[in-house]
Structure formats: C-alpha cells, structure tokens
Amino acid sequence: MSSSSSDGDTRLRHPSRFLSVSDEFAHPSEAIFAALLDLYRIEWLYEPVEFPLAWGDDGAPTKGFRPDFFLPKHRLFIELTVAEQRLVTRKNQKIRQFRELYPEATLLVVYQRDFRKILERHEIDEHGVAAA
C-alpha cells in the first residue's frame, strides 16, 4: 500500500504491509514484560508491524522501526529499551524519527531504569524469578 501526498510523495508508509512472522522474543526482558501483561489480562501483540523510517529512490523502505508490543485496546505501542543508557542513542534516533513520521501512533518507551522499577514493584529479578 502506498501513500501519496500533495507533493507527489509515493513512499510506502502503511505499517500493516510489514507484518512480523516471528513468535519468539528477541530479548528475555520482552518475555517477562509479556508475562506481566498477561498477569493483568492486557491483550498484546508482539512486534506486529514495522514502520518505515527511510526510503530509497525507488520508494522502497530502507530503514524501519518495529515496536516490541502493541496493546490493541489501548491503541498503544510499547518499546522496551533495556540496554545501558549510554548504548541507546541509535534507538532514540529511531524513536524520534518514528514520532515525527507517525504522530498519530502512540508510543511508550520503557527504559532500563523503568523496567527495573516494574520488576522491583512485582518483586521479581531480571530473569523473571520471584524474590524469596
């Protein structure tokens, strides 16, 4: 599907064109987060779409951003970023681009410090094991 603006821009924009085929989590923190969503009976989809962020001369996407989770009932995308803060610069650039290109999409970014607070609140460690 393509989008065409008044200036003749025909870039491929629609995220549903880039569906995920993976059912596995890329990082253990995503599995823990999914389990917490399940605990609260929050419906979620894992990496359901990829949003193009850059396009080649032919209009085909050359760079994209695939948020980790989508909560359909809340119309909310969630991106977990559990790397050390000094290592998240590239991801923050993608997040900024995503927000500029898709202002209609709501994205919540959960950084490492936020994720640790969630784990502490639920008394589980970074491996998903309940505290004794």
Image (cartoon, helix red, strand yellow):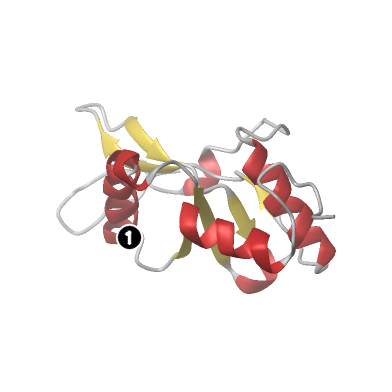
41 sits to left or right of 76: right
x and y percentages locating residue 20 in the rendered image: 61, 35
**Residue neighbourhood size for the residue with mark 1, other residues' Cα within 10 Å, grouped as few (<14), some (14–19), many (≥20):** some
Please give the count of numbered marks on the rendered protein.
1
User: Could you tell me the amino acid type at mark 1?
Assistant: Arg
Left or right of residue 11, residue 127 in this image? right
**100 is higher (above) or lower (below) than 128:** below
Q: Residue 3: horizontal and vertical position, in percent?
A: 35, 50
Which of the 4 image quadrants contains residue 124? Answer: bottom right
Q: If the image is split into quadrants, where does the N terminus sit?
A: top left
Q: Is residue 58 above or below residue 41?
A: above
Vertical placement of 122 versus 61: above or below? Answer: below
Viewer-closest of 44 and 82: 82
Picture quadrant where residue 37 is located: bottom right
Which residue position holds label 1? 99
Q: Position of residue 126 (x, y in %)?
A: 65, 46
For residue 3, side relative to residue 76 (left or right): left
Residue depicted at 21% across the width and 47% down the height: 9
Q: Return the residue nearer the eye: 30 or 74.
A: 30
In the rendered view, does 114 fall on the left or right side of 124?
Answer: left
Image quadrant assignment for residue 90: top left
From what the image shows, is residue 87 above or below residue 68? Answer: above
Outermost bottom residue: 74
The residue lying toward the viewer, choosing from 90 and 96, is 90
The quadrant the C terminus occupies is: bottom right
x then y, percent, for residue 42: 76, 66
Residue drawn 25% across the image and 26% down it = 58
